[in-house]
């Protein structure tokens, strides 16, 4: 820079100053976009969390789980599962009702949409019966929530709980379903 004239030095100084000011202005202009992006991201995260919490609360309130289990005799003497409510749009099949080596029962089955409609939020209820076929416990679960069960398609379901000696058999039925239009 020693070989530069004072005018050249001043011109270089002014160019550098202008470049720095332009860069600073560009950064300041980008900050609102960053902050608005952050706000939008924050709102999206809040909405996702809120939906998850509402879904959890809904499932907790409307799936009133009672103590759940069964005696291993129920595998030898199960009664045929019957519908809890008339749900002509679905065929519910219990494939397994047993107790594992840790004393937990499992009810495993599948639900088939036998209608020409599409459903979501299909709510299932298991009724646990004693040796006299009286209902001694109930439990609910979703066969599908926000996903769909299309016409002719099946969805698996599973109920699990701790062993209750009076659970001798089970029947599972659809208690609610929302048609997708």
Image: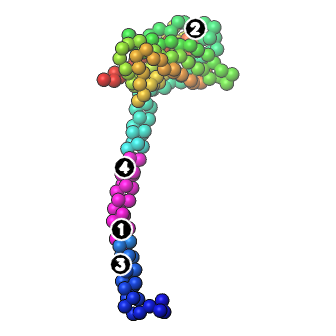
Residue matched to label 1: 26
Q: Identify the image quadrant of residue 47.
A: top left
Instruction: State how far apart marks 3 and 1 are (Cα).
Output: 12 Å
Indicate the secondary structure of the residue bearing disc 4.
helix
Q: Which mark is residue 161?
A: none
Along the line of sight, the residue nearer the viewer: 31 or 173: 31
Is residue 36 shown left or right of residue 105? left
Is residue 42 shown left or right of residue 67? left
Q: Residues within 10 Å of mark 1 (few under 14, many from 20)?
A: few
Residue 12 locus on image (x, y percent): 40, 84
Q: Which mark is residue 43?
A: 4
Residue matched to label 2: 78
Residue 164 locus on image (x, y percent): 59, 19
Magenta range? 24-46
Label located before the other in sequence (3 or 1): 3
Residue 125 visible in the picture: no
Label located before the other in sequence (1 or 4): 1
Label located before the other in sequence (3 or 2): 3
Q: Residues within 10 Å of mark 2 (few under 14, many from 20)?
A: some
| Quadrant where the image shows the C terminus | top left
100 in magenta = no
Asked if labels 2 and 3 touch by Cβ distance under 8 angstroms, the answer is no
């Amino acid at each position: 820079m020693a070989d530069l004239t004072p005018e050249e030095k001043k011109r270089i100084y002014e160019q550098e100053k202008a470049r720095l000011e332009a860069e600073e202005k560009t950064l300041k202009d980008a900050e609102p976009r960053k902050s608005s992006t952050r706000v939008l991201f924050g709102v999206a995260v809040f909405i996702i969390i809120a939906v998850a919490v509402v879904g959890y609360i809904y499932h907790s309130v409307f799936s009133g789980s009672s103590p759940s289990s069964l005696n291993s005799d129920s595998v030898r003497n199960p009664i045929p599962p019957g519908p809890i409510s008339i749900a002509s749009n679905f065929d519910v099949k219990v494939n397994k009702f047993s107790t594992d080596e840790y004393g937990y029962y499992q009810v495993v089955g599948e639900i088939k949409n036998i209608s020409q409609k599409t459903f979501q939020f299909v709510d299932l209820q298991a009724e646990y019966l004693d040796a006299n076929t009286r209902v001694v416990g109930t439990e609910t679960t979703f066969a599908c929530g926000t996903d769909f069960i299309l016409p002719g398609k099946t969805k698996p379901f599973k109920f699990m709980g701790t062993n209750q000696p009076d659970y001798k058999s089970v029947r599972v039925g659809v208690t609610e379903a929302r048609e997708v239009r």
